[in-house]
Amino acid sequence: MRKKTKKIYVGDVAVGGDSPISVQSMTTAKTSDVEAVVAQIHTLEKAGCDIARSAINSIEDAEAIPEIKSRTSIPLVADIQFDYKLALAAVENGCDCLRYNPGNIGGEDKVRLLVDKCKEKNIPIRIGVNSGSIAKEIIDKFGGVNADSLVASALEEVKILEDMDFTDIKISVKSSDVNTMIDAYRMLSDKVEYPLHLGVTEAGPLYQALVKSSIGIGTLLKEGIGDTIRVSITGDVVEEVKAGKAILKALNLRRDGIDIVSCPTCSRTTVDLAKIVKEVEDKTANLDLSAKVAIMGCPVNGPGESKEADFGISAANGMGFLFKNGKTIKKVKEEEIVDTLIESLVEANKNEN
Ligand code: SF4
């Protein structure tokens, strides 16, 4: 069962409570390069990203926020490391959320200024603790970088905000070590009601990042912990979104988009199944469809193996078969099977809406 957390809003996207678990990613172009950032957010939006985040490293980056926001439609989180003036500038320029640790500000008066500004503009703050950024005193106190020190560090940040009556908070305690990350989020989830942003930090290149994130994020989501996720990958940011959505789909936590179930093929397969799967993936990528599609390598087991899906297809000996509810409903030429499937999906989605 999903753990009940406080619902906050990042722009128009609800995070926490009973809201759907959102998928986030981060732009990599310099934020002041509006054209590049807008183009990147558009590709993220297309891939199904719910919330984008951009690093604000200069006043020019902060001043780019209004134009970026006017040309994109998903909420924008401003990621600031130390400079509280940049945090203030990001809020003043209309970011939808700040990722900022108030412990970095250096002084209660400055924290107060920022908190007042966030309250005035209704901007939540994500406290983002990483295994690489825990204060030395906390590391010493808890005997190293571990789940205890990650959580203690996050709670210290939370206290600063709560002492100023600021509770529009979400929290992350990311580690590059999957076991540490799981332990930290479990511990934190027991201690706070704030929504949690899950992620394995510095997860590595694609393959490694997918495995680490699926285990780390997936384990926690399965336990009902987590309200928004980011799969961090060294590489194409679109892959982060695709991976995030795939994790949610695998756990039946989101159903938007096409969920492909395809068999591994065996000696009964007489077609290039990988090619068919790729064709379905590519042709449905930009369609607003929701369905589970089974793609099977043989027509004998196809109907049975595709029973749990909305539609199934298979092909053999020049013929393509379309299945629904475990029965063959159409038989077409092999090269027409993908388009036949897509027509049926579009029709079924129309009827549902
Ligand atoms: S669906 Fe058919 S081709 Fe695919 S693995 Fe099963 S038996 Fe083999």
Image: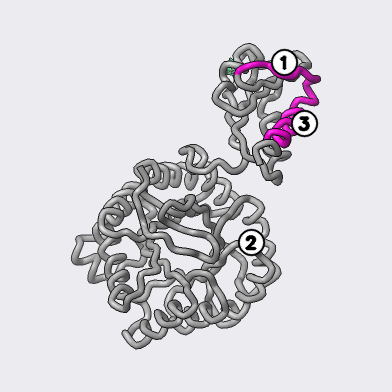
| Disc 3 and disc 1 in contact, CB within 8 angstroms | no
Instruction: Judge depth for marks 3 and 1 and give the one in front.
Output: 3
Location of residue 107 in the rendering, given as x and y in whole percent from the top left corner = 32, 85
Q: Residue at x 63, y 13 (%)?
A: 268
Q: Residue at x 70, y 69 (%)?
A: 35
Badge 3: residue crowd in 10 Å (few <14, some 14–19, many ≥20): few
Q: Secondary structure at mark 3?
A: helix
- Depth check, front residue: 191 or 152: 191
Point out the stretch of residues depicted in magenta.
326-348
What residue is shown with label 1? 316
| Disc 1 and disc 2 in contact, CB within 8 angstroms | no
Asked if the magenta segment contains residue 189, the reply would be no
What residue is shown with label 3? 339
- Depth check, front residue: 324 or 214: 324
* Ligand 1: quadrant of the figure: top right
Label 3 beta carbon less than 8 Å to ligand 1? no
Q: Mark 1 or mark 2, which has the lower sequence index?
A: 2
* Three-letter amino acid code at the position of disc 3: Asp
Q: Please tell me in which quadrant of the rendered image residue 70 appears.
A: bottom right
Q: Which mark is residue 41?
A: 2
Badge 1: residue crowd in 10 Å (few <14, some 14–19, many ≥20): some
Q: Is residue 218 left or right of residue 22?
A: left
Give above or below for 146 relative to 96. Answer: above
